[in-house]
Amino acid sequence: MSGALGERQRDRLLAVGAALFAGTLVAGARGIEDSLLSDSVGAGGVPQAVGITMAIAAVALFAKSLRGAVPASAAEAKDTVAKDAKEMPWPAVAARSAGLVLILVAYGLLLPVLGYAATVSLLVLASGRLAGAPFKPPLLLYGALSGPLLWAVFDRALQVRMPVGSLWG
Amino acid sequence: MDTVIQALTQLASVGIIVAAFGGVLWGIFGGALPGISPSIAMALLLPFTVGMDPTTALVLLASVYVGAEYGGSIPAILIRTPGTNSASATVTDGYAMAQQGRAGEALGISLISGLWGGLFGLAVLVLCTESLAQVALAFTPAAYFSLGILGLSVIAGLSGGSLLKGVIAAGIGLSIAFIGSDPVSGVPRFTFGSSDLLGGVKPILIMVGLFAVTEMLAQITEPDWAKAVKSEAKLKLPNWAMSKRLFKPQAIGAAVGTIEGVTPGAGGTIAAFMAYSEAKRWSKHPEEFGHGSPEGIAAPESANNVVTATALVPLLSLGIPGSNSAAILLGGFLVHGLQPGPMLFSKAPQVVYGLYGGLFLANIAMLLLGLVILSPCIWLVNRPKPYLIAGILALVMSGVYAIHQSFFEIFLVIGVGVFGYLMRWLKVPVLPLVLGLVLGFMVESNFRRSLVISGGDITIFVTDKVSLGLLLLAALLTAYTAWKEFAPKSKDKTP
């Protein structure tokens, strides 16, 4: 999934993200109120040190990404293009990945409502379909059986109480 | 000798026998599926081990690792697609042999070499670990802090090729470890007012998210792998003449695997490639390598199975996981309230001996199951990929809920999975993050404890000789890695 951005651009993005994270960490650590039981370092001491180290690494990474083009990059770019030609175009990759995330979030939201067996069946159906399985009897059967089968494994065999679902009372 | 006897007594436990065979079976199937690494196969089972006896759980997880290393060679040989990264070195000669109609022979060589490698690695584990742990028992808090720093710097440097990205990843892992209550004063830190975060973030959730969910997010966009031909499924063990020929490459694999296994951050993949390279150098028939040389399979397969045991040396003796799979095993320890390291030998020796016995059984199980499992493996590899992805996701999400019956944790794992996917896109290595997470408490608490002991005098970390030595080693390794990363590259004349 290289696609939209080159490696240097991604390194810069990472560096900026890491710097922001580090800044937030240091600021958050400074805001921690120490208790009377605290030692000389305090609850915020080590997080601040880690944040500063990360910030230094982020700046160094950004600087490194700005360095002049390495002579081998032309060959690397060729290899990357050749490799990417076999991959999905990046908008399709992003859409499919986002779709799976939405399916997983929906699973988490529906689990307390529909209960475990039904939600797992829907998860299997939806993710299988997204992954490219045709919406035909084999997938439908697979989905329909997954829920009750896994419920039997967890709830009965492993004695882990799985949600019944508020919809069914 | 005492250790060996203790380990052998564990073999009588039915739970451990079942765990060893079950783990190996799961590992072989998982390893045979391209994209499912040993660490993912272990991460999938991790939530299920929560309610188990600790020894049984750890044997189960370690056995998955053993099985997966053999399982990965099956698609490597049959369809030129390594099931695991460490099987990549087997592809060239393995697939070449398959094309010559010798797939069964190649698989037999892989199985036997893996067996010898696994048993050799186990011997190294048993002989070295306790001695190293005894040394570590004498460590002061300052030395423990420095050991944590050394572990982090080695992993940050060796994983993924970029020290800077490794440092960033380790920093993120440490930051996650800070969430919860301060270890000294109990003050809440980075909980954002959420009661769910007061107890901190359990490493098991991060591991499942980073390894399993992230991998499924990646797999759903990758093309399907080739299908294996069932008629090739007839395993053939090496005869006496072949076994004599394979002795040298297996020995080379064992030696390389031992060194790479005990080195944090190195791991099975590096060991496999190095073993292949050395076996070719010392072979009487180097011209055969790349064209179906049995030695080209024996060496890497021996090496990667040695690593399944030797990677546990730093984990059990020092509490530092040297590979992704060892990190998952550490997660297994933590889930059961056990802290690997020198104290483990005095607090829970039965767990260690059980693990030794279990690993022995796992290698035997790998041989026995390997003889019969080929057809079902091929059947599994040939299933439509969407069904496999859907099934694995169902297992993962079910397992996450099963840990603490928490809906919050489901969303946490999804979030971690998305973050892991982003890390993969940005080419940030995962192991430093995992190590930062699991070592965070050890590093911080020993740092602060040392300063309490010294009355706030920071020079304690250099006046303590062991601590100084470890810090110097960490500094040297970091400097070397930084020099490699920042030194100007020579001009490449490639058009």
Image: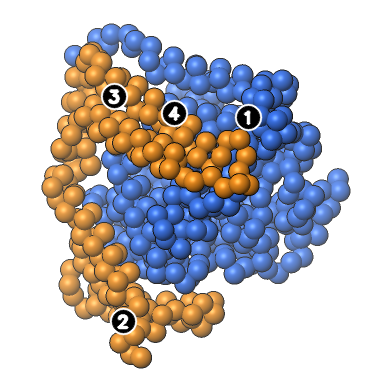
Chain colours: A orange, B blue
Q: Are marks 1 and 4 in contact (CB under 8 Å)?
A: no
Chain to which mark 1 belongs: B
In the picture, the disc for residue A62 is 3
Residue at position x 46%, y 34% in the image: A48
Instruction: For label 1, count other residues whose C-alpha is less than 10 Å away and answer few (under 14), some (14-19) or many (20+).
Output: many
Instruction: For label 4, count other residues whose C-alpha is less than 10 Å away and answer few (under 14), some (14-19) or many (20+).
Output: some
Work out whether disc 1 and disc 4 sit on a shared chain: no
Q: Which residue is mark 2?
A: A114
Q: Nearer the viewer, residue B105 or B316?
A: B316
Q: Are marks 2 and 3 in contact (CB under 8 Å)?
A: no
State which mark lies toward you, 2 or 3: 3
Q: Is residue B237 visible?
A: no
Q: Secondary structure at mark 1?
A: helix
> Does label 4 or label 3 sit earlier along the sequence?
4
Dot 1 amino acid type: Ser
Residue B293 sits above or below residue B32 on the image: above
Q: Secondary structure at mark 3?
A: helix
Work out whether disc 2 and disc 4 sit on a shared chain: yes
State which mark lies toward you, 1 or 2: 1
